[in-house]
Image (cartoon, grey):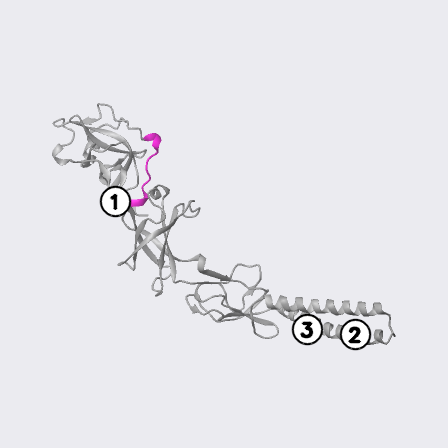
Amino acid sequence: MLGLFVLSSCAASEAAQSETPAAATATPGSGAAAWTSLKLVAATACPERWSDDVPARVVFDERHTSRVSVPLAGRITQVYVERGQHVAAGAPLFVVTSAELADLRGQRAKATVELATAKTTLERVRALVEAKSLPAKELVSAEQDATEAQLALRTAEQKLASLRVGTAGDTAFTVTAPRAGVVVEHHVSVGQQVASDAAPLLAIADVSEVWIYADLLDDATHELHVGSPARVTLDGDAVVPATIDEVSAIVDPDRHTVPVRLRLDNIAGAIRPGAYAEVAFHAPASAGVCIPAAATLSDGTGRYVYVQQAGALRRRRVVAAPPIGTLVAIREGLTAGDVVVTEGAALLDNQLPATD
């Protein structure tokens, strides 16, 4: 992560506006640092500003993505598509040879025969009952058998219809695309054994919109909100305006960062999922105070600045937000008008004891 967003602010418990003892000061002529080599600036209200670019990635929109599995176990015998290929809704994706399909079709054939037999028996029994050669209860039994056979055939046909696949022979079926889009995930090959409870084999996404994800440290998201402006840089030079679509409420357990998502139109298809991008975020003017980022220093336990006070320079602990652009917002430790050293502070570090 670029420096503008990866710096963590020191804990509030370290940030009381405590100043160093009088020994840790420098005055003109004291032999500490030559005042002519120092540059001082006053803390001012934070203006609106843009961050530096941070790395980001282009991801297909999960809300417009269909994942494809198989309804029955079997073996892949033919594959029609590759990753990155555009497909139309209903286009063939791959063929599966399945013994389970043969069983379902066998059940339907059996049910068809049993229904025909039950209907023939029913007509014969009805004629005998009408001729009073059989009791009426035999007709009731024959009607029940015919009804059960009808239900069995209907069930067998519904099982086959629920597969929503194309025909590819008595023992094979063709899986078709549930939507138009681009094949963005591809885990299928000829000869592969597949099962209905396995992970999806393909994913097809509508890429007319894409997501841009930037991963920021938690402390760098405090001034970011849904709807805040951002700028996305693609292919190194194409800058596209955008707005924040979501700031995740949790930290990604793998990346240990907070995903910040933007959404971009991609009607022309020029933005490809999987590509890299850069994002700059906009911070509005705020009531806090800002100073140049170079004015803050760290001793490993927290951040501090050198403040001009009564003709001397004194080290003071601060709580600093991550820098945005060339400025850093100070959450605790400074007020508007405080004058801090912004250049040459390292010289003071060499002269003043670290007693705070």
Query: From mark 2 to mark 1, how far is it between C-alphas?
Result: 88 Å
Question: Dot 1, how many residues are within 10 Å of its Cα: few (below 14), some (14-19), or many (20+)?
Answer: few
* SS at mark 2 in the image: helix
Mark 3 or 2 closer to N-term? Answer: 3
On residue 48, the disc is: 1
Side of 194 relative to 125 (left or right): left
What's the magenta region? Answer: 4-14
Q: Which of 143 and 258 is in front in this view?
A: 143
Amino acid type, callout 1: Glu
Residue occupying the far right of the picture: 133
On residue 121, the disc is: 2
Q: Where is residue 293 in the image (x, y as percent from the top left)?
A: 24, 40
* SS at mark 3 in the image: helix
Q: Name the residue under label 3.
A: 109
Q: Position of residue 356 (x, y in %)?
A: 28, 27
Q: Which of 189 and 167 is in front in this view?
A: 167
Q: Kindly tell me whether residue 100 is visible in this rendering.
A: no
Q: Kindly tell me whether residue 347 is visible in this rendering.
A: yes
On residue 7, the disc is: none
Query: From mark 1 to mark 3, how far is it between C-alphas?
Result: 74 Å
Amino acid type, callout 3: Ala
Queried whether the magenta region covers residue 229, the answer comes back as no
Side of 41 relative to 145 (left or right): left
Mark 2 or 1 closer to N-term? Answer: 1
Amino acid type, callout 2: Thr
